[in-house]
Image (cartoon, grey):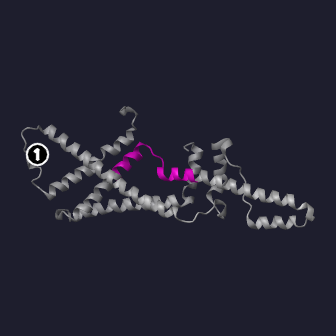
Amino acid sequence: MDLSKYPLERVFYLVAGVIPGFIALLIFYLSSPGSFAWFFSSLFLGYRTKIAIVVLAAFVIGNSLTTFLSGIMGACGGVVGTIQARKPYKSSYTYDFAPWRDPRWRLLMRQRLGDQAPNDTRLITDHILDQHKQVIELLPENQRAEPLANLILAKSNAELDDMRWEQWYAQYHQQVTLQSGYQDFAWHVRSGLNYNLQAASVYVLVAAVFVPSLRHWWWILPACFWVVLMVAEALSGVRNLMDKWSSLSVQIQYLREGRL
């Protein structure tokens, strides 16, 4: 395995796993004060070896906790996705207003997609269709068939183009929403710290049920803060993912900067 090819910012997520790991070891020590006495009093291991073992244990335990928390959050996301998928399908052209019809976004997308871009057509609403039909009915009866067929074909093609624009928009909407902004190295450091502190806080609140010595404000208050922050971030992510309009301005910005 060539570690030089592994992104440095992703390594930080693993290293920061020692944070919940140390918290878990500390809680275990508080619940059983004499549990580590034999380890630290051992004469067979030097202090450097003891420190290395503690750090390694914290690393393994911490990353196990974050992996478990990620699994729970992923399962919750799957439930939300399942509920969303059960909603009746609504065709793109039935929306009166839609972000994929924004002329700025379409212009940038045509430049981005080139020949793959759908036709930049406008929907023919039922009201406009009725108006055209009224005009066609003014023609002699033997001349109505062809313009009526062309009108229906134009409406179908416009709806097909609108559906293709929606598919492109949905693809980039999900990409932009899930990546949560510009992911530079500093962003990964903050995100890694936040997520590991949140995992540690969840463990503190769960352990407080079984460990009386944790039932103090200096444990509970910071833990509640990080857990509330985690829940707020998750709810905000779900809301943005379900709100198609939420990523329009970001998509336009990213397309202009060539980051999509």
Judge whether 108 appears above or below 159 on screen: above
User: Crowdedness of circle 1 by 10 Å Cα count: few (<14), some, many (20+)?
Assistant: few
Q: Position of residue 68 (x, y in %)?
A: 32, 53
258 displayed left or right of 230: right
Magenta part mainly helix, strand or loop? helix
Q: For the magenta stretch, what is the residue range?
A: 170-194
Q: Quadrant of the image for the C terminus?
A: top right
Q: Which residue is mark 1?
A: 39
In this orientation, which residue lies closer to the viewer: 178 or 94? 94
16 displayed left or right of 91: left
Q: Please tell me in which quadrant of the rendered image residue 144 appears.
A: bottom right
* Tag count: 1
Q: Residue at x 37, y 60 (%)?
A: 229
Q: Residue at x 31, y 54 (%)?
A: 197
Q: Position of residue 164 (x, y in %)?
A: 65, 52
Q: Position of residue 33 (x, y in %)?
A: 11, 55
Q: Please tell me in which quadrant of the rendered image residue 3 appears.
A: top left
Q: Residue at x 66, y 56 (%)?
A: 101
Q: Residue at x 47, y 61 (%)?
A: 82
Residue type, mark 1 in image: Phe
Q: Is residue 182 magenta?
A: yes
Q: Secondary structure at mark 1?
A: helix
Q: Is residue 102 magenta?
A: no
Judge whether 111 appears above or below 220 on screen: above
Q: Position of residue 259 (x, y in %)?
A: 54, 43
